[in-house]
Amino acid sequence: AALRRAMELWTDPLVLASCGDAMAPAASLALTALDYYTGHAMFGAPPLCRKYEVAPGLAIDRVAMACMSELLERAGSAQYAIKLLRSLGGMAVMDWEGNEEPWTDMPIERRAKFALATIRFIDSEDEQSQFGRDLEMPMGAVNNLLKTICGMQNPTNAFIAKSVWQKAADDGEFFSPFGAGFNAQYRAFFYYFLRGNFLFGEKGSVGWGQQDAMDVVKIYKEYDEIPFSHRAPEDDVKAKEKDECLRLAYGNKRHEERKEMFRSL
């Protein structure tokens, strides 16, 4: 009971934001708990673990978001957060041998909230280099967690995947962990992903039959490098597509205001 309560507090974004490094020991405790439950083949096992949990109080999506938040805030627990993400990334692709995976029946909105948090983390990856060479960001694990929780692998579920991506794109401002008004630049990527048919294997895309090989981190980095329309040649198709995705995310009026502001810089 004590472990559960401690982990529920640590994975609560409001508690984590309020307490800062005072919660740093929690990441070490979480890693110890996960190692213990894994070593004794009890991870995710009821009745010790509730739905979505890999250890008591450690829901797989919420502990991953707590780790990413710790890294974004450059918390003192960075090394433990990285180790936890690597462990969770391994769980995301493992064979659960008939047992219920901790993402089974997870609501679409909850998956979309995780997707938004993950894309923001990917966007900030370069900033994490300040931790030093010994703390390389586990982007492979993050990629696997994102794809699995969003229905793109283990198992692949086209309906869930498209629903999650559409929910994050259309309604992300209402449930994002970052609050309304701070998500449009990330929501634009979800529109780009959907409109580019990355999920369903249209011509020029990765292909639905090859989802295991898809690197969402790489796709986001390539999207991020596309220039804004006011800085690109008029015939730049990718820049025009990015501009349209930003318009969908920000809305017509706000998007035009932003473009005018950027032109004046």
Image (cartoon, rainbow, N blue to C red):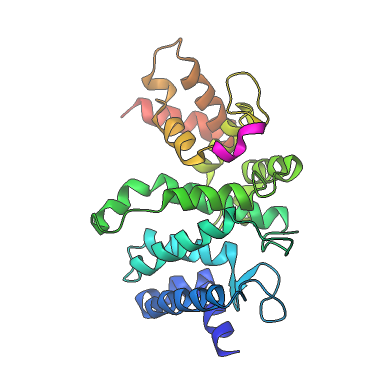
In the shown orientation, is residue 72 left or right of residue 178? left
Q: Is residue 182 visible?
A: no
Viewer-proximal residue among 143 and 244: 143
Viewer-proximal residue among 193 and 177: 193
Residue at point 74%, 61% (across, down): 98
Viewer-proximal residue among 57 and 223: 57
Establish if 10 lies above or below 93. Answer: below
Residue at point 56%, 65% (across, down): 62
Q: Quadrant of the N terminus?
A: bottom right
- Where residue 169 appears, x then y in whole percent? 62, 41
Residue at point 71%, 70% (across, down): 51
Q: Quadrant of the C terminus?
A: top left
Establish if 38 lies above or below 238. Answer: below
| Main SS, magenta residues | helix
Q: Identify the residue at the far top of this view.
A: 235
- Where residue 137 appears, x then y in whole percent? 36, 53
In the shown orientation, is residue 21 left or right of residue 112? left
- Where residue 186 appears, x then y in whole percent? 51, 42
In the shown orientation, is residue 231 left or right of residue 88? left
In the shown orientation, is residue 160 left or right of residue 14? right
- Residue 153 in the magenta stretch? The answer is no
Residue at point 72%, 64% (across, down): 99
Q: How many marks?
A: 0
Q: Which residues are magenta?
A: 209-213
- Where residue 65 appears, x then y in whole percent? 51, 61
Establish if 75 lies above or below 95. Answer: below
Q: Is residue 161 visible?
A: yes
Establish if 144 lies above or below 5. Answer: above
- Residue 211 in the magenta stretch? The answer is yes
